[in-house]
Amino acid sequence: MAQVSTAFEQATQDIQTLSERPDNDTLLRLYALYKQGLEGDVHGNKPGFFDFVGTAKYEAWERLRGMPSTTAQKRYVDLVEQLLH
């Protein structure tokens, strides 16, 4: 578990070094995995209809409901590694 946390923390720093910005779908996956890895299941109210970005982020995170935090962190690390190579 400690290894996963350490790798997750490193990946959150490594993502900042990307030479190109990922596409929007990848950004949503990164966001959702990051939030699930840190906070667990989605909470709070869904953003309003006209908040398109907020709604997309909320829904991406909501799709991961029930995924253990360590699994989300592992998937985040894997995705970051793919983007870096």
Image (cartoon, rainbow, N blue to C red):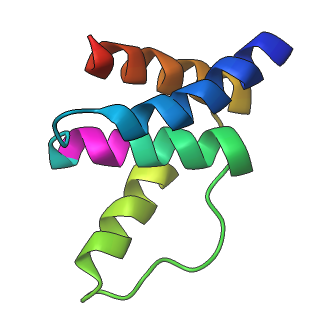
Residue 71: x, y in percent? Answer: 63, 21
Q: Is residue 70 above or below residue 60?
A: above
Report whether residue 14 is seen: yes
Q: As rendered, which of 13 and 69 lies closer to the eye?
A: 13
Q: Is residue 21 left or right of residue 8?
A: left
Q: Quadrant of residue 1?
A: top right
- The residue under the point 35% across, 71% down is 55
Residue 9: x, y in percent? Answer: 66, 31
- The residue under the point 16% across, 37% down is 20
Q: Is residue 68 above or below residue 30?
A: above
Residue 84: x, y in percent? Answer: 30, 18
- The residue under the point 53% across, 27% down is 11
Q: Is residue 27 magenta?
A: yes
Magenta residues span: 25-29
Q: Is residue 43 left or right of residue 16?
A: right
**The C terminus - image quarter:** top left
Q: Is residue 18 magenta?
A: no
